[in-house]
Amino acid sequence: MSDIILTAYDGAILGPIAKILGWIMNGIYNIVYNLFGFENVALSIILLTFVIYMCLFPITYKQQKFSMLTQKMQPELQKVQKKYKDKKDQNSMMAMQEETQAIYQKYGISPMGSCGFMLINFPILMALYQVFRYVPAYITGVRNQFTSLVEGIMSTTGFETTMAGIVEELKLNTIRVDFTITDKGALSNYIVDVLYSMNSEGWDMLSDKFSGLTDVIASTQAHLSEVNNLFGMNISDTPWSIITTNFAAHSYLMVFLALMIPVISYLTQVLNIKLMPQAPSTGDNSSDAMANQMKMMNRIMPLFSLFFCFGVPTGLGLYWIISALIRSVQQYCLNKHFQKVDLDVIIKKNQEKAKKKREKLGISENQINNMARMNTKKVAGSGMSNAEKELALEKAAAMRSQAKPGSMAAKANRVKEFNEKNSR
């Protein structure tokens, strides 16, 4: 049984992520056990959440800086929007897009900067869902608790039919089982998956079906109750399952504790959103419409976690609560930090980085002015804006860097370099 590899999630994208997270969680579980002699999956989830958000902190910091810089550059973006407000032709639309992009480049941020955290956090959340559903597949200390019981079940005649009947009677349709196969390793995997997914009713049924294994069944169930315990709840059960089971048994304290998992998840999400910087009203209809949509999303997301939390393992609800609390602490500290930071200094540093990047491509500041003068024939007014100059510079750099050897552009580059060298 020591070489069992359980039916861990094998998805092409989330599978490897779940494997990495499971490996980290297994390490945390073993460290806690070796140091303190204490085995508890809930504690491992809390510590895993802390590790994940410490690793994600650089992204959180960048996202916060993005939010601050976005508010800072709003007046310039609105100026561009007003400039092209009534112009719907293709040239005007392209010019508006280019000037907007130049403003983002000026401030050193990407228009997609706010999506970075979501693009990373969402796959982690989905992978953790699989880890918490199949804990024995990832944590060896939990898996080893099933060794004696699985060996006893598989030595019982007709165990395949008996286990299939238990799965059907308990309606365990969320796990993958096939007791018709002959591979003993796979069969043992399925048995562990079933045992870990069973509630107290299932364990009573198991004792009735395998009466000769009563003692090992009782000891395994007792140890799992300690390992999976969270204030008396089994973290592999869903809050809804705990509520319905204990309500029928008139155990109202457990009903209350299970109900608190979704409620606290909702409240911590609301707290986290309250601490996030909110975009002020600008008076611009399109910008205010986007701000209103964001406010609506901020109302919906906590409600989503409230209802979704009822149907997922309690361990995932615990992760949501702890992660929201950690984010709230981080957000509070970052708010205090950025209150003391001079954003103009950050913008200046970004501009210096852009300047050094252009210099590596062989573009001097004099060329910016030359391009500006050349484009005055195409642009109405006295000259190009700073944003337009920046954009023209980037385009020139790209064209020069892509010039093929021997081409007219390459020859022109050599002539220009020769002239610039002799003019110094």
Image (tube, rainbow, N blue to C red):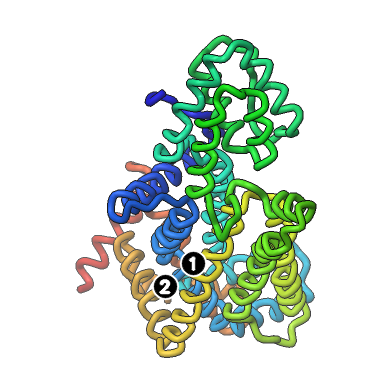
| Dot 2 amino acid type | Ile
Residue 227 percent coordinates (x, y): 48, 48
Query: Of callouts 2 and 1, which one flags the residue occurring earlier in the amino acid sequence?
Result: 2
Residue at the (56%, 77%) spot, across then down: 70
Question: Which amino acid type is shown beneath numbered disc 1?
Answer: Ala
Query: In the rendered image, which residue does mark 2 sit on?
Result: 368
Give above or below for 136 relative to 162. below
SS assignment at label 1: helix
- Identify residue for label 1: 392
Check whether the beta carbons of the residues at disc 2 and disc 1 lie within 8 A of each other. yes
Residue 14 percent across, percent down from the top left: 54, 40
Horizontally, residue 353 falls left or right of residue 82, namely: left
> Who is closer to the viewer here, 205 or 119?
205
State which quadrant residue 413 falls in: bottom left
Q: For this rendering, which residue is in front, 134 or 23? A: 134
The residue lying at 39 percent from left, 24 percent from top is: 3
Mark 2: secondary structure? helix
The Cα atoms of the two marked residues, 2 and 1, are separated by 8 Å
Q: Quadrant of the N terminus?
A: top left
Residue 366 is situated, as x and y percent measured from the top left of the image, at 35, 74
Residue 284 visible at all: yes
Find residue 227 and name its label. Answer: none
418 up-or-down from 188: above or below: below
